[in-house]
Amino acid sequence: MEETKKYITSAELRTHNKAGDLWISIQGKVYDVSKWMNEHPGGDVPLLALAGQDVTDAFIAYHPGTAWKSLDNFFNGFYLKDFQVTEVSKDYRKLVNEFSKMGLFDKKGHNVIYIFLWIAVMMSMVVYGVVCSDSVVVHLCCAAVLGMAWIQSAYLGHDSGHYQMMSSRGFNKLAQFITGNCLTGISIAWWKWTHNAHHIACNSLDHDPDLQHIPVFAVSSSFFDSMTSVFYGRKMEFDSIARFFVSYQHWTFYPVMVVGRINLYIQTFLLLFNPKRNVPNRTLNILGIFVFWTWFTLLVSYLPNFQERALFVLTSFIVTAFQHIQFCLNHFSANVYVGRPEGNDWFEKQTKGSIDITCATWMDWLFGGLQFQLEHHLFPRLPRCHLRKISPVVQDYCKKHDLPYRSLSFWEANVSTLKTLRDAAVQARTLADPMSKNLLWEAVNTHG
């Protein structure tokens, strides 16, 4: 005799939305992942962000077909009574299915091999130039090459972090360890912690860590209310110091990007050496960071004096600033919201919160595939070699469902980002009477 199905409503599902009592729904079946949360390969942040909701679209986006067979282990016997699928979600799932049948998720291409070889060549050039030359010009050129090697290595770290790069999980982890920790000094554990949260809660002011830069930057006046960061678990105080920095943020944006790498190093150390945080492969991550600081310190020590060493580091940071700027261009001037991401409008949130950068095909190597930011957010498992191919398809679907598809030139994206920062800066200034009456300042910011 067939067993009678047990049902709960979406409202009841939402009550199971916290650590220790965490349920989710996938295609109408309800799963209890409370105990699985700390073992989840993507970390606990994505599960907590979408807890108590139907997460079908997000699950499809981030998991291969082989993951479906593991779901039965967490099925708690309930089905969602009022389960519905929007037309947008139906079309999205059709796209994923079509791409899967075409084998796009599995066809990695050979670009990875070429980029690895190119990074090896660049690193060899840097070491040879620093060790074997006494020329200041040669040393500064080596610093620029090192910065470019870091950029390309970070792209590979990003690809492997999404398990796009290698055919097996083990090789992907090895690639993460080498390209992230050992070559760039940025922990892949820190990257996955923040990056997964960014993807799931794209452009949520209180959930997306990639928009939480108080006291230095604020992309929205909503930050002026000192909102609480759900990701970091602390209040982002908009005090007099934050108001001062934000008031000039459209002027300080590029200088801060030059030294932005220092913040990534600091964040890496804060996470890896925080005993309260559950860090997967902590020892391995620390070992990789030790490898980086060993070779980088030895390399810089070969330079003849302090001035050259400082210029070398600064030059390498200036080059990598391009990448930090690019990350900001993809999201800073897109739509933002406050609150948890909703599983049933996942597709819409990605389109509204992402901006593509238009560039020629021969420039793809410089942008690392992330110029197709929306395509990447919609299909994070898709290798970058296919993103340009599927871009027209994504544009058509956005047009069909009346969703935004913003693709700006690099120049236009910079202008749009600076305008967003300037608008928030003007509003920050008006919060303090003496500043708001500064007519010269107002004139400069009103007319650019």
Image (cartoon, rainbow, N blue to C red):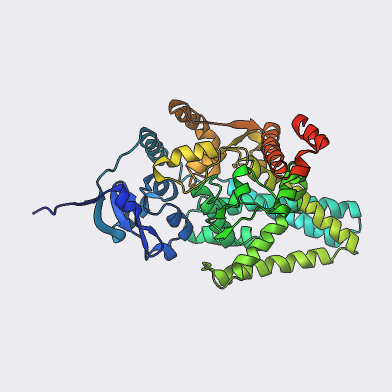
Name the one closer to the observer, 80 or 380.
80
Q: Is residue 145 visible?
A: no
Locate residue 73: give its quadrant: bottom left
Q: Position of residue 34 (x, y in %)?
A: 37, 63
- Total label count? 0
In the rendered view, tell whether residue 266 sits above or below residue 411: below
Q: Quadrant of residue 448?
A: top right
Q: Is residue 286 visible?
A: yes
Q: Can you give x and y, in whole percent of width and height, for residue 86 in the image?
A: 35, 36
Compare residues 139 and 370 and report the one nearer the observer.
370
439, 260: nearer the viewer: 439
In the rendered image, which quarter contains the N terminus? bottom left
Q: Is residue 26 above or below residue 184?
A: above
Residue at (51% x, 43% y) in the render: 377
Q: Position of residue 12 (x, y in %)?
A: 30, 52
Depicted 280 relative to depicted 161: above or below: below
Judge left or right: residue 338 versus residue 130: left
Residue closest to the far front: 433
Residue drawn at x 68%, y 37% is 423
For the point 53% across and 51% down, the residue is 207
The picture places residue 82, in percent across and down from the top left corner, at 27, 43
